[in-house]
Image (cartoon, rainbow, N blue to C red):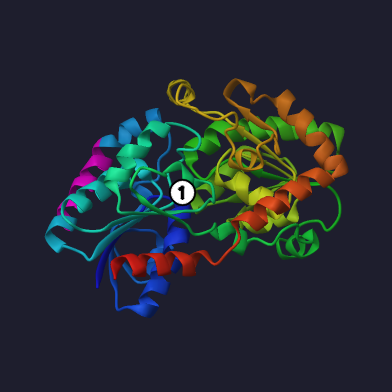
């Protein structure tokens, strides 16, 4: 069985790799396409490296658009001539869903893992998505209902993070492993996994850190750098501050810290699943924000708040993301820790997303293909 695959984000690589491995335990499968390192380790032949797709924001995409369109054209051609048993994609919907639509038009089953964020913005995409796909595997229990009546086969498989992340772990083990102080307040700073995000957000985060240190002199910070390039960039930006930069290990960092300041995104869900009090702050290109804001259909931007149906974590977006607002929100978290209400709501989210995602996804794929 030949299967074409495509993932456009680190999270997509992490989700899809074990699913492909589990499918291979039941059938003899050969994978090729756009792959990250974990998918390559799972046996995928990379036609294109995944990092060529990793770009976020409308205005940020424009300089890369010719290259992205060229890659998609080549992938469509590859699908047409290789005639795989199926196309399985994950994340990067703006790139992957048109590719899925092409495969479906050729009579090749198009399966996508991780629903686009139609819960948050542009719900008018749902009819089009239904025409582009044969099967959509969703990470959140409320998502299949959004597609009800569209004709698209939709299945909730659980969220892999809920299985991978222990809720409210003892920080001592993580601090020991990361060679961090065993006592005292520790702030996790996660300004994103792309250079553009880090350059835009880290100066704001560092300014907030300086203000917090003025109030709490023994405060230390720790930043997980997703790549060697980001490690070097971050080291050059922090100067003489009492901040430790580590290679990767973002989940270990979350387990070690007292509180977290992060860019809004998947990391916000990871932080809440870990049970650490969190503040989300994000700034983007003003034109991108203007275009996105007009399409928002929810009160909250961060996923944990949408799941909790309340402001479980403070979120500060664009102009609201100021040093003053961040410091005011984080100070009680560092001094008092998580509230009982936060822990209760966070644990409820953890339990609602739990399940063997890999087994559920592999079984759904194999059942559809059979």
Residue 106 sits above or below residue 84 on the image: above
Q: Is residue 52 above or below residue 66?
A: below
Disc 1 marks which residue?
A: 144
Write down the quadrant of residue 70 in the picture: top left
> Is residue 258 something that shows in the picture?
no
SS for tag 1? helix
Magenta-drawn stretch, dominant element (helix, strand or loop): helix
Quarter of the rendering occupied by the C terminus = bottom left
Is 225 placed above or below 108 here?
Answer: above
Q: Is residue 241 left or right of residue 335?
A: left
User: Is residue 180 placed above or below 298 in the rendered structure?
Assistant: below
- Quarter of the image with the N terminus is bottom left
Residue 57 can be seen, yes or no: yes
Q: For the residue carrying disc 1, how many other residues have a C-alpha within 10 Å: few (<14), some (14-19), or many (20+)? A: some
Percent of width and height locating residue 126: 37, 38
Query: Is residue 135 a member of the stretch shown in magenta?
Result: no
Residue occupying image coordinates x 49% and y 59% = 157
**Magenta region:** 66-78
Expressed as whole percent of the image width and height from the top left, the position of residue 80 reads: 14, 56
């Amino acid at each position: 069985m030949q299967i074409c695959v495509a993932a456009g984000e680190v999270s997509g690589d992490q989700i899809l790799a074990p699913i492909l491995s589990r499918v291979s335990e039941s059938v003899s499968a050969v994978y090729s396409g756009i792959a990250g390192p974990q998918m390559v380790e799972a046996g995928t032949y990379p036609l294109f490296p995944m990092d060529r797709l990793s770009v976020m924001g409308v205005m940020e995409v424009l300089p890369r658009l010719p290259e992205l369109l060229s890659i998609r054209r080549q992938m469509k051609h590859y699908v047409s001539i290789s005639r795989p048993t199926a196309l399985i994609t994950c994340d990067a919907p703006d790139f992957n869903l048109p590719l899925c639509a092409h495969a479906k038009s050729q009579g090749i089953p198009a399966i996508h893992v991780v629903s686009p964020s139609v819960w948050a913005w542009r719900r008018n995409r749902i009819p089009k998505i239904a025409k582009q796909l044969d099967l959509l595997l969703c990470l959140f229990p409320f998502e299949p209902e959004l597609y009800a009546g569209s004709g698209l086969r939709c299945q909730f498989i659980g969220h892999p993070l809920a299985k991978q992340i222990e809720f409210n772990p003892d920080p001592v083990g993580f601090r020991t492993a990361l060679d961090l102080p065993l006592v005292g307040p520790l702030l996790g700073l996660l300004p994103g996994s792309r250079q553009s995000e880090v350059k835009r957000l880290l100066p704001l985060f560092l300014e907030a850190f300086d203000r917090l240190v003025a109030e709490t002199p023994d405060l230390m910070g720790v930043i997980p750098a997703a790549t060697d390039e980001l490690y070097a960039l971050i080291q050059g930006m922090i100067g003489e501050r009492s901040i430790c930069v580590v290679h990767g290990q973002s989940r270990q960092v979350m387990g070690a810290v007292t509180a977290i300041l992060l860019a809004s995104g998947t990391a916000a869900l990871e932080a809440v699943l870990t049970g650490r009090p969190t503040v989300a702050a994000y700034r983007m290109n003003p034109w991108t924000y203007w275009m996105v804001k007009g399409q928002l259909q929810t009160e909250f931007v961060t996923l944990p708040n949408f799941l909790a149906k309340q402001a479980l974590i403070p979120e500060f977006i664009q102009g609201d993301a100021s040093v003053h607002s961040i410091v005011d929100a984080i100070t009680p978290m560092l001094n008092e820790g998580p509230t009982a209400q936060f822990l209760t709501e966070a644990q409820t989210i953890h339990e609602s997303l739990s399940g063997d995602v890999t087994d559920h996804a592999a079984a759904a794929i194999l059942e559809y293909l059979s």
